[in-house]
């Protein structure tokens, strides 16, 4: 069977590419080894946020006395929390399935293997396509220390799929976004959580002040954080696990918990993807492409987490999908891939877009930063937010917004306004000239921009 475009992987990148191609009148076949929606929908972004919301609601009950509300005998049902999470996931996945069905896309469930000349084999059949898009995503990676493969050592997939992992203590190896968000979930449920991070701070790719703020927030929730920690070995059995590590001073210590979460990043899912001899250029298992998403093999493209040197985020995969399909169809790429918001769903939320102050200075800009704190915002005070800020990074000469970092309620929603400002080359004056509703958290953006004008 021959199609115009074949797509391997049905996550945000894959199903977006399929939709974009189908609406242009192309015939499309979409291969998915598991469930449509990929990691983000089934065992990543969506399940995490559903559990964070439930755990935060439980934690809020314990702090309701300050609002004049008394809650007695508050408890949580771990199984019910996961059941609701599954309901959300199934509902969204049903929507994706309807989308591809309505688009007339041929969906083949099975593990596809890509050969030369646009051939793909799957479930014993061979398919052909004029262009092939790889969108197989990524999978959890492990640090190869003694005991990494023991029962009781889990990945984010184990925590988020099905019934999850009901424990009262947890050791998390890795202080990136996955580790931090999982720490927030379990800490809000009253669990004893320890984070071991090899770098000098958690959330190492983000602005240093964000890392410091999130560290303080997690510690206030009772999370123990050890940075500069080199994990040496994992021992034990489910219910009683131990992680031996060397701290930043070289002293050997031990962290114990009922389970261990390996949150040490994700690697491109390319194992077994290619017929031997049909591989494009790879870098540490990830597919190397040019700026247009084209690999070293003509008519073979890659998008999302499987692509080398890309930010592993669902919205990046979707953006790359739109651009690659446009290129295949002879159009200009419609999405600016240079402006990528990053979000962390702690409480309060964290978001960042564009350059940090250090990055802007390194790029040769004369930088001026302005900040608005949570304590000066009416909506934040009403909601009881105690700490946080919105920081704008601007070019001191022109006032152009170069970046923004936010630690505040609704940060993951507010960051879109600042992404748009950066994309359009807007200045702090432009932002300050835009009326923001009162009382809202969005006024923090307005006030940070006005502070720049005030000098």
Image (tube, grey):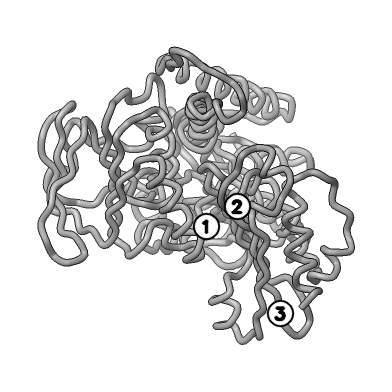
Q: Residue at x 52, y 39 (%)?
A: 9
Q: Which mark is residue 316?
A: 2
Expressed as whole percent of the image width and height from the top left, the position of residue 406 reads 61, 56
- Work out which quarter of the rendered image holds the N terminus and state it: top right
Q: Residue at x 64, y 57 (%)?
A: 373
Q: Which mark is residue 395?
A: 3
- Of the numbered discs 2 and 3, the one sitting upstream in the chain is 2
Q: Please identify, in this view, whether the residue under mark 2 or under mark 3 is nearer the observer.
A: 3
How much space separates mark 2 and mark 3, taking CA atoms?
26 Å
Query: 53 and 32: which one is in front?
Result: 53
Q: Please identify, in this view, whether the residue under mark 3 or under mark 1 is nearer the observer.
A: 3
Tags 1 and 2 touching, CB below 8 Å: yes
Expressed as whole percent of the image width and height from the top left, the position of residue 39 reads 48, 37
Mark 2 crowdedness (10 Å alpha carbons): few <14, some 14-19, many ≥20: many
Q: Residue at x 11, y 47 (%)?
A: 146
* Disc 1 secondary structure class: loop
Expressed as whole percent of the image width and height from the top left, the position of residue 453 reads 81, 74
The residue pinned by badge 1 equals 311
* Disc 2 secondary structure class: helix
Q: Residue at x 28, y 59 (%)?
A: 198
Expressed as whole percent of the image width and height from the top left, the position of residue 322 reads 69, 50
Marks counted in the figure total 3
Mark 1 crowdedness (10 Å alpha carbons): few <14, some 14-19, many ≥20: some
Is 307 positioned to the left or the right of 383 in the image? Answer: left
* Disc 3 secondary structure class: strand
- Of the numbered discs 1 and 2, the one sitting upstream in the chain is 1
Location of residue 234 by image quarter: top left
Asked if 193 appears above or below 158 in the picture, the reply is below
């Amino acid at each position: 069977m021959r199609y115009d475009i074949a797509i391997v992987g049905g996550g945000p990148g894959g199903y977006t590419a399929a939709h974009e191609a189908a609406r242009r009148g192309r015939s499309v076949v979409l291969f998915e080894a598991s469930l449509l929606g990929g990691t983000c929908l089934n065992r990543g972004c969506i399940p995490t946020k559903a559990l964070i919301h439930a755990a935060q609601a439980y934690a809020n009950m314990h702090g309701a006395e300050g609002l004049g509300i008394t809650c007695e005998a508050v408890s949580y049902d771990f199984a019910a929390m996961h059941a609701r999470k599954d309901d959300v996931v199934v509902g969204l996945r049903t929507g994706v399935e309807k989308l591809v069905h309505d688009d007339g896309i041929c969906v083949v469930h099975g593990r596809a293997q890509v050969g030369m000349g646009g051939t793909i084999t799957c479930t014993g059949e061979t398919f052909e396509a004029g262009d092939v898009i790889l969108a197989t995503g990524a999978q959890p990676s492990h640090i190869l220390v003694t005991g990494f493969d023991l029962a009781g050592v889990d990945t984010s997939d184990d925590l988020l799929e099905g019934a999850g992992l009901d424990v009262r203590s947890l050791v998390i190896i890795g202080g990136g976004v996955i580790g931090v968000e999982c720490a927030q979930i379990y800490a809000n449920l009253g669990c004893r959580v320890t984070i071991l991070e090899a770098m000098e701070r958690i959330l190492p790719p983000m602005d240093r002040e964000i890392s410091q703020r999130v560290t303080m927030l997690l510690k206030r929730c009772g999370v123990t954080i050890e940075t500069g920690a080199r994990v040496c070995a994992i021992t034990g059995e489910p219910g009683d696990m131990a992680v031996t590590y060397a701290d930043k001073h070289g002293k050997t210590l031990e962290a114990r918990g009922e389970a261990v979460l390996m949150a040490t990043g994700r690697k491109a899912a390319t194992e077994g993807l290619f017929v031997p001899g049909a591989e494009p250029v790879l870098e540490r298992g990830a597919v190397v492409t040019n700026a247009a998403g084209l690999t070293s093999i003509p008519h073979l493209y890659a998008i999302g987490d499987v692509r080398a040197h890309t930010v592993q985020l669902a919205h990046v995969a979707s953006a790359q999908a739109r651009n690659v399909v446009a290129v295949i169809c002879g159009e200009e790429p419609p999405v600016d891939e240079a402006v990528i918001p990053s979000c962390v769903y702690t409480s309060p939320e964290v978001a960042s877009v564009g350059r940090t102050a250090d990055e802007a200075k390194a790029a040769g800009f004369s930088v001026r930063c302005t900040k608005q704190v949570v304590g000066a915002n009416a909506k934040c005070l009403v909601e009881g937010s105690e700490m946080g800020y919105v920081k704008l990074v601007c070019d001191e000469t022109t006032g152009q917004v170069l970046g923004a970092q936010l630690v505040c309620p609704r940060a993951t929603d507010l960051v879109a306004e600042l992404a748009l400002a950066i994309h359009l080359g807007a200045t702090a004056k432009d932002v300050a000239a835009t009326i923001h509703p009162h009382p809202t958290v969005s006024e923090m953006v307005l006030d940070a921009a006005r502070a720049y004008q005030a000098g």
